[in-house]
Amino acid sequence: MSTPTLKIENLHVAIEGKEIVKGFNLEINGGEIHAVMGPNGTGKSTLASALMGHPKYEITEGTVTFEGQDLLEMEVDERARAGLFLAMQYPSEISGVTNADFLRTAINARREEGDEIPLMKFIKTLDKKMDTLDMGEEFAQRYLNEGFSGGEKKRNEILQLMMLEPKLAILDEIDSGLDIDALKVVAKGVNEMRSPNFGCLIITHYQRMLNYIKPDKVHVMMQGRIVKSGGPELAERLEAEGYDGLKKELGIEDETVNQEA
Ligand SMILES: Nc1ncnc2c1ncn2[C@@H]1O[C@H](COP(=O)(O)OP(=O)(O)OP(=O)(O)O)[C@@H](O)[C@H]1O
């Protein structure tokens, strides 16, 4: 058996002393796409931020390995260099840094000194990927996310994903605020990345994203942990019944981790 790309065991995460993630387990093997769905406030974004090493999130228990290495021991930049990518629900704007400069710097940060990506190759690859995502040429020279619409920011995150070619991407609600055309474009980008060397964790409320990116596994998160796992049909059931049907089946009464705490 090969080493899983990501292995999360009994993870507990607290924010300002309050436990939000409560015993989360997940294993993603190379090339698999997993979706984590769940109602508001169940700890999905907290999980994503904790995996990326956000200092505000305290890991109180559990282990996480990335290709067999202890992820929790790694600094944030080490996690990115090791091939972990996080697309945020609200990408930040950086004035004075163009999209193209940012991407080239980020790509080179993951390469050895002296092995930087040649400029022409970079430009050619960037053009091709921007074309796939229906992005106008001007986006390369615009400051990072500054003045971008919500949909443009999401598209831009997928551009970063395609350029950086991570081993594992965590996509936190990249579908929120997207119109149907943008959603299809974003899905096209992710689908183009599909390969045995690319794993993906998609965090979403809605099934609609999963109509375009077919996950191998779907997990439902409630009260800070996975309460049910299945295939794409689980997402379809949630879309039809809402989360209430599942809560009844599992005997879960609380809606959020807050109420339980
Ligand atoms: N920085 C913070 N300080 C205090 N509480 C926080 C912080 N971040 C998250 N929380 C709380 O943790 C709980 C889980 O939040 P989280 O954003 O992880 O949920 P989520 O499942 O991603 O929700 P949504 O689907 O609405 O985005 C919420 O009750 C939230 O208020």
Image: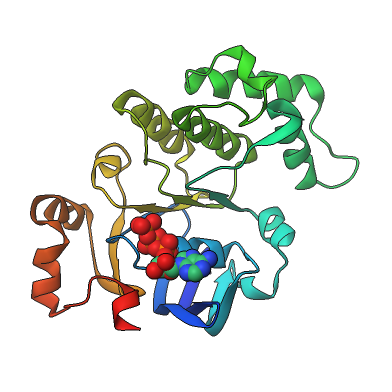
User: At 28% across and 59% down in the image, what residue appears?
Assistant: 218
User: At 70% across and 69% down in the image, what residue appears?
Assistant: 74
Which residue is situated farthest in the bottom direction here? 61
Q: Is residue 81 visible?
A: yes
Residue 160: image quadrant is top right
Q: Judge from the rendering whether residue 37 lies leftward or rightward of residue 33; answer left or right.
A: left
Colour scheme employed for the rendering of this structure:
rainbow
On screen, residue 29 above or below 208: below
User: At 52% across and 17% down in the image, what residue appears?
Assistant: 131
Q: Between residues 145 and 102, which one lies in front from this camera angle?
A: 145
Q: Between residues 168 and 17, which one lies in front from this camera angle?
A: 17
On screen, residue 219 above or below 148: below
Q: Is residue 4 visible?
A: no
Q: Between residues 2 and 203, which one lies in front from this camera angle?
A: 203
Residue 212 point in image, percent of width and height: 29, 36
On screen, residue 147 above or below 24: above
On screen, residue 219 above or below 207: below
Q: Quadrant of ligand 1?
A: bottom left
User: At 34% across and 68% down in the image, what residue appears?
Assistant: 42
Q: Judge from the rendering whether residue 253 lies leftward or rightward of residue 155; answer left or right.
A: left
Residue 79 point in image, percent of width and height: 67, 60
Residue 91: image quadrant is top right
Residue 151 point in image, percent of width and height: 44, 30
Image quadrant holding the C terminus, namely bottom left
